[in-house]
């Protein structure tokens, strides 16, 4: 039986889906372990950690919402839009807001495919952090102009 010319593409798609599933299961296990670790901490320690992360005391649900590879995707997006991570760090809570927005993003797959060059969308159409990235770039330009 002759092999279809679409077979390599189909096999590539299946391999991608399997890799996605494997990553999702690994991320779910990691999140479950992180939730368990947080839930077993003394309340004061847990609340201090949550406060540092910008989350309400006693609420560890954010761990469930975190997307796999959010830090890698955010770093790639920052590089694309021309934002130096050190500029975000200098703004303090801005970096935490960027991290939380990225970790809770529902478009992480689209972001990953875009960064891999598999889709040609404009990231400003799907990345909720782009207004903050733009503001950071604007602030840096203004700071340079002031001397």
Image (cartoon, rainbow, N blue to C red):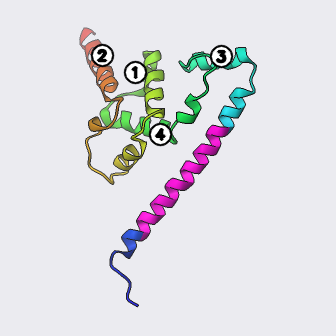
The residue wearing badge 1 is 87
- The label nearer to you, 1 versus 4, is 4
Whole-Å distance between the Cαs marked 1 and 3?
28 Å
Judged from the image, the secondary structure of the residue bearing numbered disc 1 is helix
Are circles 4 and 3 on residues that touch, CB within 8 Å? no
Looking at the picture, does residue 140 appear above or below residue 124? above
Instruction: Choose the circle earlier in sequence order: 2 or 3.
Output: 3
- The label nearer to you, 2 versus 3, is 3
The residue wearing badge 3 is 47
- The label nearer to you, 1 versus 3, is 3
The residue wearing badge 2 is 139
Judged from the image, the secondary structure of the residue bearing numbered disc 3 is helix
Instruction: Choose the circle earlier in sequence order: 4 or 3.
Output: 3
Whole-Å distance between the Cαs marked 2 and 3?
33 Å
Whole-Å distance between the Cαs marked 4 and 2?
24 Å
**Residue sitting at 71 percent across and 31 percent down?**
37
**Residue sitting at 50 percent across and 41 percent down?**
69
The boundaries of the magenta stretch are 11-32
The residue wearing badge 4 is 72
């Amino acid at each position: 039986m002759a092999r279809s010319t679409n077979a390599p593409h189909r096999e590539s798609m299946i391999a991608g889906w399997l890799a996605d599933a494997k990553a999702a299961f690994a991320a779910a296990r990691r999140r479950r372990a992180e939730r368990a670790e947080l839930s077993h901490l003394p309340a004061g320690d847990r609340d201090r950690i949550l406060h540092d992360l910008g989350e309400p005391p006693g609420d560890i649900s954010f761990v469930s919402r975190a997307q796999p590879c959010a830090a890698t995707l955010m770093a790639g997006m920052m590089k694309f839009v021309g934002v130096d991570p050190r500029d975000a760090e200098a703004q303090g809570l801005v970096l935490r807001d960027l991290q939380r927005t990225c970790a809770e993003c529902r478009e992480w797959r689209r972001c990953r495919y875009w960064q891999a060059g598999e889709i040609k969308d404009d990231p400003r159409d799907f990345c909720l952090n782009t207004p903050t990235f733009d503001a950071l770039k604007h602030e840096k330009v203004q700071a340079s102009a002031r001397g």
